[in-house]
Amino acid sequence: MPIINQTDFLRHGKFLFFALIFSFVFLESLNTKERAKALTLGAFGALTFGLFSVIYNLLGYNVAFDHRLLGPLDAAVYLAFYLAPFFIYSSIDYLKNPKNLKKLWLPLSLGILLLLTRSMGAVGGSFVILAFYVLKNSPLFKKKNFKIALITASVLLIALIFYTKILPTLTTEYSSLDERGEIWKTSAYLLEENFLFGLGFGQFQQYYEENVAQVLGHEPLDYYVLQPHNIFFLFLFQYGILGLLFLTYIIYTVIKNILEQKNLTAALIAAYFLLHGLIDTPFFKNDLLILLITFFELSKED
């Protein structure tokens, strides 16, 4: 397909280039202990940006209509995607030694900020990953009170997802699920003639805007859609069939590394990206692509 949006083509290329360079330098120049310190520093960076976002929103800048925490970013899900990997990382670091309460404040703080984004994909994805870790590895699971707390948290999360995502779909004319339905329907249409080669690097937004009304037969809930909200659509649109093959390789590798427990923490965080990627895909932002590539590569190491 011809490149019809040169700006996005160059922007996405820049993000990919710097993500690859950063990940390479991170993996090749730091030893295991230095990487752990760097990731902890990254968690503090995420916390700092989250707190800045709280102040930014409280001052009345860039506040979403439903008051979700997003700070200076385009959408709350971008902030959630930034916070969630470090929330998972710091939570697992604490769960390895739950008696060390000094390590609890960091995941607790990141978790509160994550809840304020009201991104159910990030909250639910993080919960699933951490619940899996606890079931497989944490000594806490042997305690009856913790089992009760885990079940209670599961029920509350299901209720929260129903209240914030499913109920609006049933009772109003707009919800994020309604919007995603339109995006996925239009994406499926665009793939009919572009499955082998995709739409081109960074071209989805332009093609979506030009085709969505025709595909739906009515005005869409939103014309300004940056990403297809599904990781399979994303890789197909960006790279065509080669993207789908590469994504299949990523999924296979992550599952294999989780089962073999090589670098389990990194593998689970990579799995989070894949899980949340089923409904959100803002990876082609330079910081988020850096995290995706870095944790995926880390997951392959012993």
Image (cartoon, grey):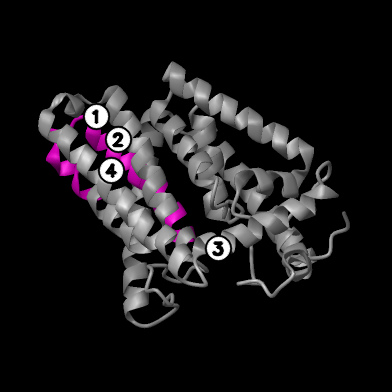
Residue 47 seen anywhere in this rendered image of the structure: no
Helix, strand or loop at mark 1: loop
Structural distance between the alpha carbons of marks 4 and 1: 21 Å
Q: Which residue has dot 3 on it? A: 178
Q: Amino acid at mark 1?
A: Lys
Q: Give the mark nearer the N terminus: 3 vs 1.
A: 1
Residue 88 screen position, x and y as percent: 35, 42
Task: Work out whether mark 4 precedes mark 1 in sequence or the reverse, and give the earlier one.
Answer: 1
Measure the C-alpha gap from mark 4 to mark 3.
25 Å
User: Where residue 40 sits in the image (x, y, percent)?
Assistant: 33, 43
Q: Is residue 125 above or below residue 249?
A: below
| Front label number (4 vs 2) | 4
For the residue marked with disc 3, what is the amino acid?
Answer: Asp
Q: Compare marks 4 and 2 and give the one earlier in the sequence.
A: 2
Q: Residue at x 49, y 59 (%)?
A: 78
Helix, strand or loop at label 4? It is helix
Residue 143 sits above or below residue 63 on the image: above
Q: Amino acid at mark 4?
A: Ser
The residue identified by callout 1 is 96
Write the start and end of the magenta stretch as one range.
78-106
Neighbour tally class for label 1: few under 14, some 14-19, many 20 plus, Cα within 10 Å: some
Image position, residue 230 (x, y; %): 60, 49
Label 3, label 1: how far apart the Cα atoms are: 40 Å
**What residue sits right under mark 4 in the picture?**
154
